[in-house]
Amino acid sequence: MKIIEWLKTIGITCENEELIEQAFIHSSYANEHQSRHDNERLEFMGDAVLQLWSSTQIYPLNPPLSEGEMTRLRSSLVCEKALAGYGRALNLNQFLKLGAGEEKTGGRNKDAIIADMFEAFLGALYLDQGYDAADRFLHLAMDPYIVHPADSEVFKDYKTKLQEYVQTDRRKSVRYELVSETGPSNSPTFTMNAIVDDLIMGTGTGTSKKQAEQNAAKNAFEKLVK
């Protein structure tokens, strides 16, 4: 099945099929095929649409959330790991076009690549069909997590949880330290330590520093609350 056919299953018909398909072209594929058309510019558009859409869904929640609570919820809903989760749940990564090297190193299942693809697809959909089509797609992908964001492990912000836990003791502080960066430059793996009062309390890895920090914070938080 092609992405255009998949869209028809959710009631969306596109005009510019080439634009939609471009959303799934990773830079590694474009480089191998000597093409300038990857999904990075579309990702920029999708990010803007996602920020607006998620804000308009969070604002009317009842009981009303404070500004800080809305910001934290939006951050958890649009973070890299969350976007990758939406993409996997809908099996959108099956449509990715990757370079041979990226395919061999598991790029089709990497959070960073799937998250970028998700935003690029949203950007392409918005440019081709406007806000209503983007709205329909995002409701399909994200509604369960906006209504009950705490129900899914994927969307727990462990950096915030760790900071709040540590703040109960004013003498303590949290910082994150890069331990290592391994792998090729286009697909690195980061390892970070979560350090509480100069003691290493947790360690985590990820395909971005932010993801590694979240995993380190999760590791530290679970140790501290035992």
Image (tube, helix red, strand yellow):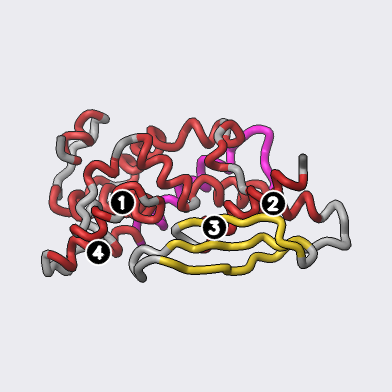
Q: Which mark is residue 212?
A: 3
Q: CA distance from mark 2 to mark 1?
A: 28 Å
Name the residue: 51% across, 45% down: 77
Q: Against 81, is 135 above or below?
A: above
Q: In the rendered structure, which amino acid carries the disc numbered 3?
A: Ala
Q: At which x and y percent is residue 188?
A: 40, 64
Task: Please give the residue where the numbered disc 2 appears in the rendered image.
Answer: 220
Q: Residues within 10 Å of mark 4 (few under 14, many from 20)?
A: many
Which of the 4 image quadrants contains residue 44? bottom left
Segment tinted magenta in the rendering: 44-68
Q: Earlier in the sequence, mark 3 or mark 1?
A: 1
Task: Please give the residue where the numbered disc 1 appears in the rendered image.
Answer: 106
Q: Are marks 1 and 4 in contact (CB under 8 Å)?
A: no
Q: Which mark is residue 27?
A: 4
Q: CA distance from mark 2 to mark 3?
A: 12 Å
Q: CA distance from mark 3 to mark 4?
A: 23 Å
Q: At which x and y percent is residue 134?
A: 33, 43
